[in-house]
Image (spheres, rainbow, N blue to C red):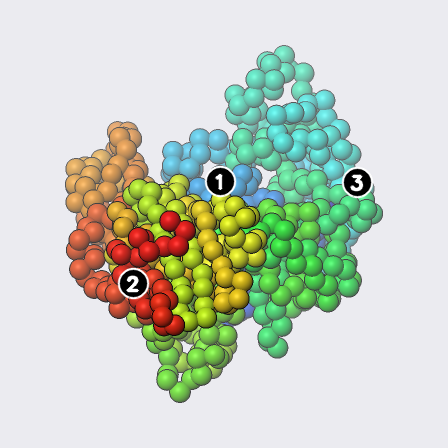
């Protein structure tokens, strides 16, 4: 059986140490590294070892009890949430670690919301029980009150028999195993009289477990656990009251409910002292199943996979990391994926990705397949459903793309940067080389959103926070040998229109000709820029119409208020005209840009700012102060939820006014307040006039755009201002 599991946590909860213990107990590594000793197996980058935090999603392969596990250690710092989210798409199960001292923290809630969004089954491990101040009962209470009421502690309520507990014949280090792979077949859960048909994948629970190296264990349930399960399933409750369920049926019910995200098992211990880790591994292995086809069957199915990461090896070779969801893929075979979807990583850009012509399919040959574990890899000739691997040969694939049967399946990422920073590099560096490096980094982290302003000779990137900029500085120095600095991060504003407007553009200097008529209207929130072609074929050929669409979507267009990117608009091509002799390649680009700009000149432009969804938990005595702070920050909140001692406040607040509130909250709550922030869409700016004045954008001095049109008379072209151009259009 193949299983992909991810380690998720707030920073410093101990997930990398926990992952080291799992690798050690499965004989995947000979000795356990430590983060503070800078020798952790999964912290393979020097930056991670120096800082003591996970920056890049590391992966490892381990064998246990006849199953192959693909282990992902994800970043826990909020600045690297985008990296964590990309890894989520591959996970069959997640393990969420919490400190027994700090409990549920701000980023823990962000992680939990993403897990629920993607429907990933999860286990909790309450770590650091050896520390002073550790309180497992309190943390369990926080999990149930802040995350899910369906969490259940399995530490003492569920026991496995001796074969399962001591790991005999299951490949664990405790059994004295040598780390060799034991069994490579596909396995399924035993036949059970209880079958929860409401879970999407419950059919896999009815198939017989294979015997290829897998040790089957008997599970003993405490009465309290049986009651907990029965309370959450009517069919199970009826059978429980009639006392007609066997231990095997209880086990299958538990497996099914975990997989269906109906309950969330919890265990506790200390990863540093290796307390409770082996028990967690044994129970996790027994209670998790996947239904990927056996290798012989997978070889007969068409391949389907999803790209979750882009990387480059030491020689600069591009690596495309893929999770195989169906079928198999071999070296020298061809893989298909959608072309020209760009690096859409958030809600604002998802329509740009979807708008890319679905007929544009790229098919490329796989030149190599690698199975990575840490910074080492093994070359293989073929991979099958359920495996994580990296391929060479795909030149344009990006994280989030579907491959093969999923080539048109792409979902935007939730974690979106709200800050932008300018890149300052030595003038002696060739800009072509600098751009090449940043485009390579953008391929690895699409959220960077690299923008090069040719006319202004300025380079900008998007980031989650200041720590990310510090890491980028180190990466550029150590990996590429260049010294750069970044300007102070600023809020990334956007602009849209409040009502429908027409835009006209005409470009006719001598021996050139193009005219474009566009309708610009408000789009759905988060829709980005949508292009629609309503031009009749008799007015303009398909090739020219496609050119207009390409120019509408080829870049982020500047708004008129602050020069910020235009978003949430629907741009419709109504008509246009070309000249059989004088129309050249760039003419429709000029006409399209002028039509957009002319329309914006007439429009009611709206400045948008990024907002956070927030969750604040604090002692009840601070409720008045917190609610006043949110209102002062121009935010809105829902009705507070309170109990005898604490309150929970949720709502929406501008990022510009709340990005540093965590320090203030910690100060007046004496460290006992908890703030969780996640991206909450763009909304009208709370201080438009002040922001426009501060930005100082001059719409008439933008070298990329002009709202005037060019007409020709007496053999010479002349410019017509935007407010006079409409009356001179040839198609009106």
* The quadrant where residue 463 appears: bottom left
Q: Is residue 289 above or below residue 506?
A: above
Q: CA distance from mark 2 to mark 1?
A: 52 Å
For the residues labelled 3 and 2, say whether their Cβ atoms are less than 8 Å apart.
no
Instruction: Read off the residue under disc 3.
Output: 210
Q: Earlier in the sequence, mark 1 or mark 3?
A: 1
Instruction: Read off the residue under disc 2.
Output: 720
Residues 595 and 263: in front is: 595
Mark 1 or 3: in front is 1
Q: Earlier in the sequence, mark 2 or mark 1?
A: 1
Picture residue at 63% right of the left edge, 38% below the top: 287
Q: CA distance from mark 1 to mark 3?
A: 33 Å
Q: Position of residue 25 (x, y in %)?
A: 63, 55
Is residue 128 visible in the rendered structure shown here?
no
Mark 3 or 2: in front is 2
Instruction: Read off the residue under disc 1.
Output: 117
Q: Is residue 224 above or below residue 637?
A: above
Residues 711 and 301: in front is: 711
Q: CA distance from mark 3 to mark 2?
A: 78 Å
Say whether residue 5 is left or right of residue 329.
left
Say whether residue 676 is left or right of residue 447.
left
Other-residue count near label 2 (Cα within 10 Å), few / some / many at <14 / 14–19 / ≥20? some
Local secondary structure at mark 1: helix
Picture residue at 52% right of the left edge, 41% below the top: 118
Picture residue at 26% right of the left edge, 30% below the top: 639
- Check the image and name the residue furthest to the front: 714
Q: Earlier in the sequence, mark 3 or mark 2?
A: 3
Residues 210 and 540: in front is: 540
- Check the image and name the residue furthest to the bottom: 428
């Amino acid at each position: 059986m193949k299983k992909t599991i991810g380690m998720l946590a707030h920073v410093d909860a101990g997930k990398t140490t926990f992952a080291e213990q799992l690798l050690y107990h499965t004989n995947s590594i000979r000795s356990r590294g430590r983060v503070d000793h800078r020798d952790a197996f999964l912290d393979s980058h020097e930056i991670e070892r120096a800082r003591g935090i996970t920056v890049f999603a590391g992966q490892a392969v381990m064998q246990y009890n006849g199953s192959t596990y693909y282990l992902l250690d994800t970043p826990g710092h909020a600045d690297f949430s985008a990296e964590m989210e990309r890894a989520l798409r591959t996970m069959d199960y997640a393990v969420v670690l919490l400190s027994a001292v700090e409990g549920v923290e701000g980023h823990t809630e962000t992680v939990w919301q993403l897990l629920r969004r993607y429907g990933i089954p999860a286990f909790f491990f309450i770590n650091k029980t050896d520390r002073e101040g550790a309180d497992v009962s309190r943390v369990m209470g926080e999990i149930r009150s802040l995350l899910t009421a369906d969490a259940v502690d399995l530490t003492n309520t569920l026991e496995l028999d001796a074969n399962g507990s001591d790991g005999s014949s299951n490949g664990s280090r405790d059994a004295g195993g040598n780390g060799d792979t034991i069994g490579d077949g596909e396995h399924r859960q035993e036949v059970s009289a209880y079958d929860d048909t409401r879970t999407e994948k419950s059919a896999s629970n009815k198939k017989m477990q294979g015997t290829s190296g897998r040790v089957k264990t008997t599970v003993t349930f405490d009465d309290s656990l049986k009651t907990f399960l029965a309370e959450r399933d009517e069919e199970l409750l009826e059978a429980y009251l009639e006392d007609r369920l066997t231990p095997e049926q209880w086990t299958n019910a538990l497996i099914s409910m975990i997989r269906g995200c109906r309950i969330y098992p919890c265990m506790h211990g200390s990863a540093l002292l290796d307390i409770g880790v082996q028990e967690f591994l044994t129970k996790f292995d027994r209670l998790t199943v996947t239904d990927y086809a056996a290798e012989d069957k997978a070889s007969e199915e068409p391949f389907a996979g999803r790209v979750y990461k882009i990387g480059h090896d030491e020689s600069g070779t591009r690596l495309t990391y893929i999770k195989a969801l169906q079928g198999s893929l071999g070296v020298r075979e061809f893989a298909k994926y959608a072309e020209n979807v760009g690096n859409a990583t958030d809600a604002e850009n998802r329509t740009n990705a979807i708008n890319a012509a679905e007929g544009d399919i790229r098919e490329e040959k796989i030149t190599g397949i690698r199975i990575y574990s840490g910074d080492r890899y093994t070359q293989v000739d073929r991979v099958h459903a359920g495996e994580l691997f990296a391929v060479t040969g795909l030149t344009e694939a990006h994280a989030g793309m579907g491959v093969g049967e999923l080539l048109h399946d792409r979902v935007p990422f939730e974690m979106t940067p709200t800050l932008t920073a300018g890149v300052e590099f030595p003038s002696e560096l060739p800009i072509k080389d600098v751009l090449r490096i940043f485009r390579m980094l953008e391929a690895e982290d699409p959220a960077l959103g690299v923008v090069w302003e040719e006319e202004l000779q300025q380079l900008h990137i998007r980031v989650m926070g200041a720590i990310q900029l510090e890491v980028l500085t180190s990466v550029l120095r150590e990996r590429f040998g260049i010294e750069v600095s970044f300007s102070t991060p600023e809020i990334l504003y956007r602009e849209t229109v409040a009502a429908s407007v027409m835009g006209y553009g005409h470009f006719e200097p001598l021996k050139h000709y193009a005219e474009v008529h566009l309708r610009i209207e408000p789009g759905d929130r988060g829709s980005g820029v949508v292009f629609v072609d309503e031009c009749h074929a008799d007015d303009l050929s398909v090739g020219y119409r496609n050119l207009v669409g390409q120019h509408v979507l080829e870049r982020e267009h500047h708004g008129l208020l602050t020069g910020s990117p235009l978003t949430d608009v629907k741009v419709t091509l109504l008509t246009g005209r070309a000249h059989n002799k004088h129309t050249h390649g760039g003419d429709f680009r000029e006409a399209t840009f002028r039509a957009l700009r002319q329309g914006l000149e007439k429009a009611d432009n709206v400045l948008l700012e990024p907002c956070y969804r927030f969750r604040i938990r604090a002692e009840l005595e601070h409720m008045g102060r917190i609610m006043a702070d949110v209102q002062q920050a121009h935010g809105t909140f829902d009705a507070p939820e309170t109990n005898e001692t604490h309150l929970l406040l949720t709502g929406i607040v501008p990022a510009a006014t709340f990005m540093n509130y965590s320090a203030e909250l910690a100060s007046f709550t004496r460290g006992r307040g908890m703030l969780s922030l996640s991206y909450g869409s763009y909304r009208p700016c709370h201080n438009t006039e002040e922001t426009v004045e501060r930005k100082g954008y001059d719409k008439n001095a933008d070298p990329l755009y002009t709202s005037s049109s060019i007409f020709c008379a007496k053999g010479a072209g002349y410019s017509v201002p935007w407010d006079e151009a409409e009356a001179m259009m040839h198609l009106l």
